[in-house]
Image: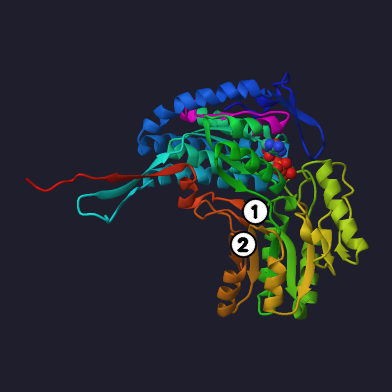
Amino acid sequence: MRSLLELIQETDGALAVDDPATGEIIARVKAYSVDEISSIIQKADAAQPEWASKTAKERANILRKWFNLIIDNMSPLAAIITAECGKPLWEAKGEVTYGAAFVEWFAEEGKRAYGETIPSFAANKRVLTIKQPIGTCAAITPWNFPIAMVTRKVAPALAAGCSIVLKPAEATPLSALAIEQLAIEAGIPKDIFKVVPVTNPAPVGTLFCSDPHIRKLSFTGSTQTGKLLMQQAAQNIMKLSLELGGNAPFIVFDDADIDAAVEGAMDSKFRNAGQTCVCANRILVQESIAQEFSAKLTAKVAALPVGPGCDDAVKIGPLIGPAAQRKVHQLVEDALAAGAIAQTGGTAHDNEGNFYQPTVLTNVTSDMAISCNEIFGPVAPIMTFVDESDAIQLANDTPYGLAAYFYTRDIGRVWRVMEALEYGMIGVNEGIVSSEVAPFGGIKQSGLGREGSKHGLDEYLELKYALIGGLGKPS
Ligand code: ADP
């Protein structure tokens, strides 16, 4: 594969990529024009029938090679993620493993795009369905998982027999380009999967939604951009997958294993410095245990080492950029002014760069901006609740519905609360739920469709029904 160094050496490109830990420009990659992307889409569309005509096993063998190459290149890929996205190297390696798992999973799952025969409504007719690749697809990915969000979309598309053109986030094109390079080495035709970095995403979104060759768009990003794309996609009634923002509640009941809940909150809240759409955004703790839980969480948060991701000891890297740092700080300031108390942190970190101190806030209330907005930073706001119905009401009081977590040891409560939470994904006594085997996605304003699992393949397939009549009678 092209080394990170070689990517960096592409000095003539219009898209500058910086290291969020230092602000230094580490690469300049080619930015594609709308016209260039338009012709790339045409090529992807022309190449798709041949890819679709391969057997699922032939495609699986190529995807399997791609998986092996990603795993073989774990260290260089992790270094690229850390360099452009900021997350610590150990976490970046975890992302490579997670990202590769979608390729492995969908290589196999592509073989199981089963149709069905349906008991007929008439004696001389037969009813059946088949599943076929939807065609040429487009994808838009965010910067917080610059490899995993790519493979989570591209692997099912390719396994299903689709071609796909992907625009990575402006902050993190290098990871996507490295993954594309490995796909080519694995034997995936270059017109079937193409990465197109740009400097300005809006015109590409418009192109993806208006080009008649594109039959499906898969987007991960903010709810605001998702709404815009959904409006634009209406003109062609395009099939859409949207994985949008969240406002995850993390509920701790008084019968919970408190130490396990603290561990779960650390995992859920501080992964990627709090920059994931499934990060705990509101920690709801039952009044009687609030003090104990807050003290234990604060002790762990205060001890988190902050610094550049390339440093082995670091647990919390930088935020993606200055605007992200300002936004987090504004939310914290606003909460403090409204009566919240910083148990630890509460300010930007002393380090140069986009660092923010890991923070625990208590006395938080549901009317504060920090309770209603996705924080996307290492800040844990704690509020209290009285009883189970109060917890459920607080948890569901948001237009979002991506992930929710709760801790309890009462089996009846496990079922009641799991069923009552209006979210697409629920962690019960678990702070991290993501896995390639399970359906990832949200309800309400958190999105449409599912990624991963057998359901993730269906997003790239059309269901066709055939009625076969005129069977006649035996002669
Ligand atoms: P975030 O605030 O997390 O960066 P965004 O929704 O702005 O979320 O970005 C997620 C992805 O959406 C990125 O790849 C970005 O370039 C892209 N994007 C942002 N605005 C638009 C737009 N108007 N049309 C198409 N894509 C967009």
> Which residue lies under the disc numbered 2?
423
Specify the color scheme: rainbow
| Residue 295, above or below 442 | below
Q: Residue furthest top?
A: 12
> Which residue lies under the disc numbered 1?
446
Circle 1 packing at 10 Å, graded few (<14), some (14-19), many (20+), is many
Q: Position of residue 23 (x, y in %)?
A: 82, 35
Q: Residue furthest left?
A: 475
Quarter of the rendering occupied by the C terminus:
top left
Q: Residue at x 41, y 38 (%)?
A: 60
Mark 2, secondary structure of its residue: loop
Q: Which mark is residue 216?
A: none
Q: Amino acid at mark 2?
A: Tyr
- In this view, the residue in front, 150 or 300, is 150
Q: Quadrant of residue 379?
A: bottom right
Q: Residue furthest right?
A: 337
Residue 283 is a magenta residue? no
Residue 189 is a magenta residue? yes
What stretch of residues is rendered in magenta?
185-205
